[in-house]
Amino acid sequence: MLELSTPVQYIKGIGPRLAEVLAAKGISTVADLLSYLPFRYEDRQNPRGIAELRPGEMATVIAEVRNSGLFRTRRMPIFQMTAGQGRARLKCLWFNGTYLRDRFKPGQMVALYGKVETGRNGELQVMQPQFEILGDASEDGSSDAVDQKQAASLEIGRIVPIYESAGQGRLTARWFRRIIRNALENIPQTLPDPIPAAVRSRMSLISPIEALWQVHWPEAGESLADLQSSRTPAHLRLIFEELFFVELGLEFRRRQMKAQTGIPFRLDDRSRDAIKKILPFHPTAAQKRVLKEIAADMEKPYPMRRLLQGDVGSGKTIVAFEAAIIAIENGCQVALMAPTEILAQQHYFSARRILESAGYRIVLLTGSLEQDRKREIRRHIAQGNAHLIIGTHALLEESVEFAKLGLVIVDEQHRFGVMQRLKLMRKTNEDGPREKRSRAAGKPVSPNELTGAEPPEPDVLVMTATPIPRTLALTIYGDLDYSVLDELPPGRTPIVTRRISDERSNEVWDFVRKQVAAGHQAYVVYPVIEENEERELKAALKMYKELSNQTFADLKVGLLHGRLDSDLKEQVMRRFQSGELNILVATTVVEVGVDVPNATVMVIEHAERFGLSQLHQLRGRIGRGSGKSFCILMTGGKVSEEGEQRLDAMVRTNDGFQIAELDLQLRGPGEFFGTKQAGMPSFHVANLIRDRQILEAAKREAAAVLAGPDPEISQSEIDRAVRHMRTRWQKTYGLVEVG
Ligand code: ADP
Ligand code: MG
C-alpha cells in the first residue's frame, strides 16, 4: 500500500538513483508523481493496418521494425526506418535524425503516430512520426516494475497518455506510464477530498481518485479534443483543486493581515491642506479615486496591503507622495523603494522639489553611498529626523532601523521578486529587527514596548507599471487589495510608433536632429542584456562615440549605462533632466520610471531583442509632456516570428493592458511574472491563461469557505481544507508561511 505522502523511492521499481532523477523534476512523493500529467494523449484504440492507410490522415500504426539507417543528403542527415506488417511497408523519416542511430532493432514492435503521406516513389511514408518502442525493456529505467505482458496492454488498444520523458530520456513516456499505473493501483481507492462537499457539488467536481485515474488512463470513448485541451471532468477537477488551494492561502493571508494591529492614520484638514498645497496640477479623476481608496485603507485599524497598477505615465508618483503626506502628518516615517538607483534618485529630486517646501525632511539611501555618509543617514533615520526615506533595496539591509515606520511604498514592483516583497514585509514585522530598531534609536521607548503589547504594522503600498490582467493580478497578488489608475493625465498626444530597418538609420538621425532643433530631447537605447553584457556594452559604447563625435558632433550627447558609478549616473541624468543634454544614449537603465517630459523621441536600436513589456516601458519614457512624441523601433538583421509579433503589437497599440495580455501569451505566465527568481510556484496542472475562468471560480469559492458561517460547510471541513492548504503552501512556496 502507498500513501500520497510516501516518498517515490518506496514505489517498486524506483531506487535511490531514479528517485534523484525524479527529484530534479520536482517529483518526490507519490502525490507529486500523480500530478505529473500527460502532456498529450494518443488514440491507439484503433491502430490501423498499413494497407488501409490513406495519404493525408493522422494514424497510429503498430508494426515491426524491418530495417533502419542513417543517410546524408547535402543539407542534412536523415534517419530512415522501415516498419512492416506482413508484406505491407511504411517508411518513417526523421530529419537530423542522427540521435536515432542506435534506437531501432529489427524485430522490435513499435507504435508510430503521425501524418501519412505519399513518398517520392509513390510509397507510403510518415515524416517525423511520434514513436514508441513496445516490448523493449532494456531502455527503461527499470524492467521489473510491471509484468511485460500487462505493460504491452497499456500501450495498445486504448487512449494512451504521453508523458514528457525525464533524466535525459532515461525515464521514457512508457516508463512513466507503468510507474504511474502502479502507483494508482496501490494507493487507497477512497481518498478523502480536501475540498468541502458544498464546494464540490457547486462546482460539479468528480472525486480525487476518479480524477487521477481518468486523467492518466482515460476511458475508452473519452473525447480526444477535451483531453488534449485539458477540459475533461478529470482535468477540471485537478485544475480547480490546485487553484482553490492557492486562492485559499491568499485569502487566508489577507484575513490574517486584517487581524493585525495597524496604524489608524487620521486624515484631517491639515493633511488635506498639505496635499492640496503640494499638488502641482489638478489630479485626474482616477488619481482622486485611487487616493481615496488608499486614504480609506490608511484610516483602518489594520495594516494596508494595497497594489496600485497604472500604465506608464498614468501619474503614480504623485499619488504615492500624497499617501506619504498623510503618514508624515501623523508623525510617522515613510520608506519609498525603487528598483534602480537612477529611479531612486529621480524620486528623491522630485520629492525634494514637491515636498520640501512643506518642511518634510527627505533622505536618499542607496547602496553606492560612501560608508560614512550611509552611517550618518542611517542615524537620521533611526532618530526620526528623516521623514521620507527614499532608496533602492538597500533599504532592506538589516542595519537600517526606523524610528517610527508608518508607510512603505514599493515602486515598480514588477522588478522586485515576490521574495523580496515578503522580506520587506517581514522587516516591518514584529519578528524582524523591531526591538533592535528602538534600541538603535536610543529611545524613545514606546509605551507598547513597556507594556509588552505588539507595536503596530506599517502600511504597505505596492506600485507597478506592468499592467497585469485583473484576474491574474488577483492570483499573484491575491493577498493585496487592488487599485488601478486607468486614465492618463490630460493633454497627452498619443505616441506615434514606427518600425524601421537600421539600414535607414540616417533618416532616423535626421529626424532626431529636427526634433532637437525644435527644442526637444531624445533617447537612443541599446540592448545590453546580462548574458552578453561585455560584448553588447562595447557595441553601445562604440555607437555612443560615433553619435557624439560624428553624427551629432554639434549637439550635446550623454551616455548612461549600468556600469557607470552612481555619481556619474546622477550627473548625466541631471544634465538630461535640466535640458542641457540634447540626446541621451542609454542602455535599459532608463527602462523604468525615468521622467523627462521634454523628451519626445525614443529610438530603440535592435528593438527585436527586447521583450514586449520592456519595449512598452521604454516607450513610456516619452509622451509625458504635451509635445507630440515618436518611438522609433530600429531592427537589424533577421527577426524571429515572435519578434515580429512584438514589434507589430508595439506599432498597433499604446495600451499597456493589451500589451501585457499579448506578452503573457507570448511568454507564458512563468516568464511573464519572472516567477523563477520571484519564487512563485509554477502550476502543475493549471495554466493561468487557459484557466482564467476556473481561477475566478476558485477565488470566489475560497473566499466563501473562509467567510463562514455557512450552514452547508462544517467547521471540520474548513479545518481540513486549511490544513491541506498549509501543507501545500509550505511545500510549493517554501519560505512563505501561512498561519
Ligand atoms: P508613472 O505612473 O509612470 O510613475 P509619473 O508619476 O512619473 O508616472 O507621472 C508621469 C508624468 O505625468 C509626470 O511628469 C507627472 O508630473 C505628470 N502628471 C502626473 N499626474 C498629472 C496630472 N494630474 N496632470 C498633469 N500631469 C500629471
Ligand atoms: Mg513611476
Image (spheres, rainbow, N blue to C red):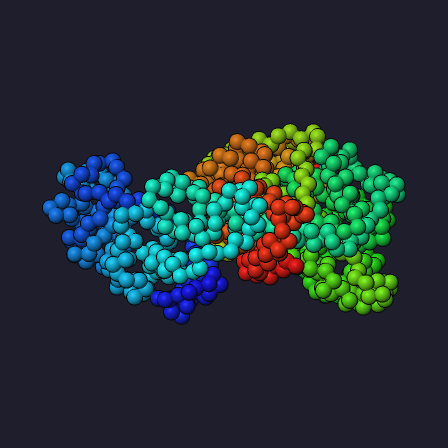
Q: Is residue 274 visible?
A: no
Where does the image place residue 308, in percent across and percent down from the top left?
Answer: 68, 43
The foreground one among 114 and 286 is 114
Where does the image place residue 227, in percent across and percent down from the top left?
Answer: 39, 43
Q: Residue at x 46, y 65 (%)?
A: 6
Where does the image place residue 69, in percent across and percent down from the top left?
Answer: 18, 54
- Asked if residue 390 lies left or right of residue 664, the reply is right
- Asked if residue 545 lies left or right of residue 40, the reply is right
The foreground one among 251 and 432 is 251
The foreground one among 168 and 606 is 168
Image quarter hosting the C terminus: bottom right
Count every numbered label the image shows and give the total.
0
Q: Is residue 61 above or below residue 33?
A: above
Among all residues in the image, which is located at the extreme bottom? 16
Where does the image place residue 177, in percent across and percent down from the top left?
Answer: 34, 56
Q: Is residue 697 above or below residue 675?
A: above
Q: Residue at x 49, y 34 (%)?
A: 648
Among all residues in the image, which is located at the extreme left? 87
Image quarter hosting the N terminus: bottom left
- Asked if residue 400 lies left or right of residue 635, the reply is right
Q: Residue at x 83, y 38 (%)?
A: 276
